[in-house]
Image (cartoon, helix red, strand yellow):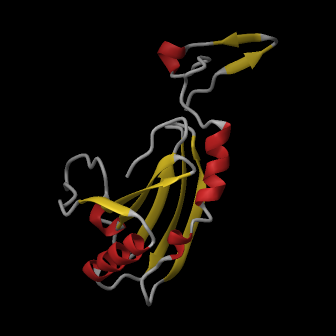
Amino acid sequence: MVACTLAAGVMVVLAGVTGCSALADAPGCSDRDERLASRLNDVPELQLHPPGTTLHDHYSGCDQNDGFAHAGRTYRPVDDIDTVTAHYRDAATTAGWKLPRVDDTPVPQDGLATSGARLCFTRTIEGTTAYLAVWFPSDFGDKRSDVSVELTASHDGEAGC
């Protein structure tokens, strides 16, 4: 990783060469999105886990590269992906989330996946579109039997599933 340096009052900017930038429109999280990240972490739908699974991991923050707030949970073990998918479809829609698309397309083994979400719900939170993604690490060849649920949203950047 290359770092931009501020030494003795002289800033070295090699934006075109190193990827560093001093431009105001450079990616990053706004103060609003930093605050939104902590509120996303408290959204009750992150606790909607399938029966028989337990919390394995949790996180929240703001993606400085793309400028969006996020919060997520990982639950395990998952015995049957179809049962888990049906659980989230029912629980999230009951909680007011919209399901504009279902992606049953297998993740390409040797290609670039643009989204790993099996389900991508949307809803307005604090005046902006929030996305609730349900995905399985096993779709990417991971041997774990987990389900991951992640919320993303942004007032000033771009978020999605």
Q: Residue 92 location, x and y as percent?
A: 41, 71
Answer left or right for 93 relative to 19: left
Q: Residue 37 location, x and y as percent?
A: 61, 52
View extreme (bottom): residue: 52
Quarter of the image where one finds residue 10: top right
Q: At 62% from the left edge and 65% from the top edge, which residue is drawn?
A: 42
Locate the N terminus and report the quarter of the image it occupies: top right
Q: Residue 7 location, x and y as percent?
A: 77, 16
View extreme (top): residue: 10
Q: Residue 15 location, x and y as percent?
A: 53, 15
> 7 or 59, which is in the foreground?
59
Q: At 41% from the left edge and 64% from the top edge, which residue is drawn?
A: 97
Q: Is residue 68 above or below residue 74?
A: above
Q: Is residue 93 above or below residue 38?
A: below
Count numbered badges in the picture.
0
Q: At 57% from the left edge and 50% from the top edge, which residue is drawn?
A: 126
Quarter of the image where one finds residue 14: top right
Answer left or right for 107 relative to 143: left
> 65 or 102, which is in the foreground?
102
Quarter of the image where one finds residue 119: bottom left
Q: Is residue 79 above or below residue 57?
A: below
Q: At 19% from the left edge and 51% from the top edge, which residue is drawn?
A: 110
